Amino acid sequence: MASVVTRAQDIIRCSLCENGAYYHCLKCRTILCDDCTSTHLSDKSKNHEIVSYTSQKRNFAFDYECAAHNRNNCEIYCKDCKKPICTKCVTGEHRKHNFADLEEAVDEKKAEILNEIQEVEATILKEIQDNKIGLNNDEYEAAIEAIFAQEDLICETVRNYGSKLREQIMKHRKENEEKANKNAFEEKEILRIIQISESMLKSDDTKAILEFKGLKCQLSVPSQSVDRSIPFLEDGLVNMDIVSSMFGALMFSDDVEDKEKMLSEENLSDQLWFHGFITREEAERVLKKNGEFLVREVEKRIEEERFVISTCWNGITHFLVTKEPLEKRVGPNGTVLQLVRHLQTTGEALAPSNPSVLQFPVDRDMCQLDYDNIKLGPKMETSGHNLFRGTFGEQIALVRSDPQDENRLFKNAHLLRFFNHPNIVNLIGYAALHKPVLLVMEDMSGGPLLMYLRKNGPSLTTRKKTNICLDVAKGLEYIHENNCIHRDVAARNCLVSTDGVVKLFDFWMTEIGNVFQVSGKFGRQVPIKWTAPEALLTGTYTPLSDVWAFGILMWEVFSCGQLPYTGMSNKETMEKIPKGYRMESPKDSPKSCVNLMMKCWQEKPEKRCRAREIVKGLQTMILSEK
């Protein structure tokens, strides 16, 4: 109930004067002070019935004597002085104070006490009750028995270590029991204080209620929080050299969920030695010395057989993780993460048939990107490449995927990370922790050169076409200087940047060295119409084989993206080229460019121009056109 606040000058005034009123004449309906009451009663012409004025306002009487006026009971509560007063006190020192009806003040105080009781019961008492008991001694005993059982499996030399673990458990239990006992004592004390408070409320002792100081101030000792984590023994390996490893670490139940999460397959990607869906060939490229290892994931396997541990141990080996070694090494619920840690800790061989020891984890390449930072946009129009406009973080990027042959992506990533030239596309990185594997490169909004020529060719000037050839020649010169053979120079394997710079792009057929010999028959993916005669006949590639292909690319540029040897099949091309057949130059091609094409198409490789000579020749042509 909200109390009514009243000013002293507005409370119980005599109807005949300004003094405080104490009485009420029911017959005359007049409120009277002491002096006026005598005068009023002296009027014998009327019948009078005098009663206390304030006694009409409540249905009970307080037995609370005013300290200032002993003959009066207190019926008003001074909110400023926080004490009961009588009506006579109002005109004295309390004249300008705030007042409330005493009944309302008592009701308000009762409500405060009741709310405080409920708060203490819901918080402090509940916390203490929750922590006073609840220790499961069976679980403690089970943990101790597990230690004894583990001791039976090992020699006598480790029993001292087991005793230390038991002491930890007993100490943990003792500390919790002491806390629980102390909380039980505090619970009794709080219940006693609450019982006294409730009895006070039931007795309706006004003085005791008003003088009550509160429950919380009587609670001097905070609750002792019981550590509810139950210790248990984490199984360790029986290792005669390291005593602690035979027992394992003493853990508590609250740690189990975090440990299981840490060792779950979801967290495998957090390990730097987990390389995701890299290919077998890529794994073999990065493993260099004995003891090195990595873990990768493969597709088209059942859930238990999707991980491979690739190692270097007197050669490269690939160990498919199956259910049997997992259960044998780390238990029925074991994970690949646990298996790798087990093998690292114990130094055991990977398998009876595989002596590899996991000594040196090979971290993921710095080029591996966070998959979540890559966003794919619309697919580009290409002639065979799976290219998307996209972003990497805030950066506009070109994204490539090749689900049918991911070796192409890794071959490109492997080479592009070392190339640094304005006419070779810049690698941002690749993402392989999830499928599909993605190759992320710089923004090349102009798209593939072949599509660019077919779309814009008729509007391109001779100078622009010559500049396109020069850009490609500069990139080719760079890779030849770095001891590489491209083996697939073609307009389809070049990209155009936003500002029109042309860059070499696809390096999946590139080989390191000055000579590369293909053994066996050509595969279906060999670009017959761009391949030099010596490569077609003997399978031998050199940098001068790239020069032949560059001549074909020049023909593509000046023909605005037409297919070389139009109307001829691959078989016809292979038959005619060694016999001296050469394509006619595209219409309106400059004579200087035609001559350069023909130099590139010399039958004998040694008579062809080298890449650096092509660059100089094209620069001269551009200067002469000014």
Image (cartoon, grey):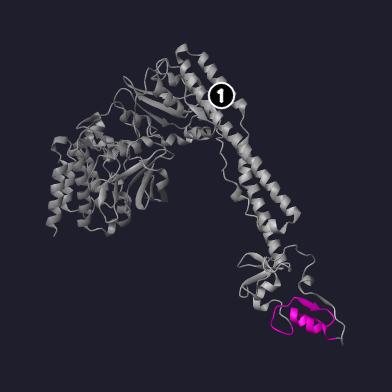
State the image quarter where residue 413 is shown: top left
Residue 60: x %, y % from top left: 79, 64
Residue 500: x %, y % from top left: 26, 55
Residue nearer the viewer, 434 or 227: 227
Quadrant for the N terminus, please.
bottom right
| Horizontal side, residue 162 vs residue 595: left or right | right
Residue nearer the viewer, 460 or 345: 345
Residue nearer the viewer, 316 or 523: 316
Say which element carries label 1. helix
- From what the image shows, is residue 29 above or below residue 236? below
State the image quarter where residue 608 is shown: top left
Question: Can residue 139 be seen in the rendering of this structure?
Answer: yes
- From what the image shows, is residue 525 above or below residue 110? above
- From what the image shows, is residue 119 above or below residue 403? below
Residue 299: x %, y % from top left: 46, 32
Magenta segment: 15-43
In the picture as drawn, the residue positioned furthest to the bottom comes out as 45
Residue under pointer 1: 143
Q: Amino acid at mark 1?
A: Ala
| Horizontal side, residue 305 vs residue 226: left or right | left
| Horizontal side, residue 91 vs residue 54: left or right | left
24 within the magenta span: yes
Residue nearer the viewer, 126 or 310: 126
State the image quarter where residue 85 is shown: bottom right
- From what the image shows, is residue 366 above or below residue 285? below
